[in-house]
Image (cartoon, rainbow, N blue to C red):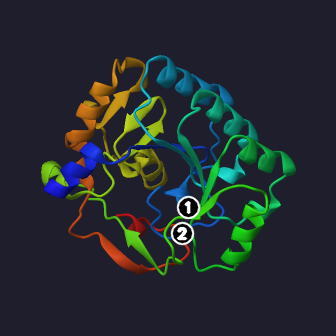
């Protein structure tokens, strides 16, 4: 528990942002709910509005901006998003998180933008028909930095179980959570502590659930006055933590394609 508090205090912070909700891989129990998400693309106008508020208010509390989804390469304006992101955040790491499936199919303007704006491409390895060594060589030959999210192919998948009754202990959960307060999410003009909270509307809409947010579950971007407010938010447990049944959550599930069943998340 102490270790997680120290990690939240001193760990380099990451801000994650969905460019899309949907994906072209559909992993069972995806922690961002991509298999059951409707087709969604963030607009350039909305994105610039968020970036402008963060920069002009001095709220760059993060060392890394992760552009993700879903599968971000599905966004029709991915090149423009890369350019826009670097305009606003000149001194941080910008990481594009992908499953790599259509990476080789991306047009020249995409690769030029990645090289020009010093974008890091991070690919997660799955047990699918991709030669990851060849993919690494392909990207590096374009003078672009590429990393893998974890060194090995993911043989197992995490199943985060949600308690529909919300009877879990928020404080105990937050003290041992490996995601909350470290990988913050920017969604609909709000900053959330974790992906489960930020994208719960996908679960609600797909399965007719009624998971609810309280005021302390997020920060409204247009009301944040200082980084100090964000730091305080990071350290405190959230009401939404009552929905995470960490005792039932399992880490060694066989990786499979989603069957779009409620049981994959609940």
Is 183 drawn above or below residue 213 in the view shown? below
Residue underneath mark 2: 27
Q: Is residue 34 left or right of residue 211?
A: right
Counting from the top left corner in percent of width and height, residue 72 is at 64, 50
> From what the image shows, is residue 252 above or below residue 226?
below
Q: Is residue 76 among what the camera can see?
A: no
Marker disc for residue 35:
1
Relative to 191, 83 lies left or right: right
Give the residue drawn at x 74%, y 70%: 137
Q: Residue at left 37%, top 39%?
A: 192
- 143, 81: nearer the viewer: 143
Residue drawn at the location 71% of the way across and 55% of the way down: 144
**Residue 187: x percent and y percent?**
47, 37
- Which of the 4 image quadrants contains residue 266? bottom left
Report the side of 10 relative to 94 (left or right).
left
In front of the other: label 2 or label 1? 2
* Residue 135 x, y percent position in the rendering: 72, 70
Determine contact: label 2, label 1, CB under 8 Å.
yes
Q: What is the x, y in percent for residue 227?
A: 33, 26
């Amino acid at each position: 528990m102490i270790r997680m508090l120290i990690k939240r205090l001193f760990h380099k912070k990451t801000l994650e942002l969905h460019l899309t909700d949907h994906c072209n891989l559909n992993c069972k129990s995806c922690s961002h709910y991509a298999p059951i998400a409707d087709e969604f693309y963030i607009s350039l106008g909305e994105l610039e509005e968020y970036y402008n508020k963060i920069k002009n208010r001095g709220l760059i509390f993060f060392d890394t901006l992760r552009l993700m989804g879903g599968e971000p390469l599905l966004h029709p304006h991915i090149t423009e998003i890369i350019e826009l992101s670097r305009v606003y955040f000149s001194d941080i790491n910008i990481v594009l998180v992908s499953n790599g499936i259509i990476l080789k199919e991306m047009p020249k303007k995409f690769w030029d933008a990645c090289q020009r704006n010093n974008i890091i491409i991070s690919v997660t390895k799955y047990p699918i028909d991709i030669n990851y060594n060849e993919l690494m060589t392909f990207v590096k030959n374009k003078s672009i930095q590429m990393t893998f999210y974890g060194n090995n192919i993911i043989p197992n998948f995490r199943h985060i179980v949600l308690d529909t009754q919300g009877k879990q202990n928020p404080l105990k959960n937050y003290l041992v959570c490996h995601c909350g307060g470290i990988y913050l999410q920017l969604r609909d003009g709000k900053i959330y502590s974790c992906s489960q909270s930020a994208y719960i509307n996908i679960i609600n809409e797909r399965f007719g659930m009624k998971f609810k947010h309280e005021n302390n579950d997020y920060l409204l971007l247009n009301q944040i006055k200082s980084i100090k407010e964000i730091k305080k938010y990071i350290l405190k447990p959230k009401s939404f933590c009552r929905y995470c049944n960490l005792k039932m959550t399992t880490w060694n599930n066989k990786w499979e394609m989603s069957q779009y069943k409620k049981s994959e998340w609940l």
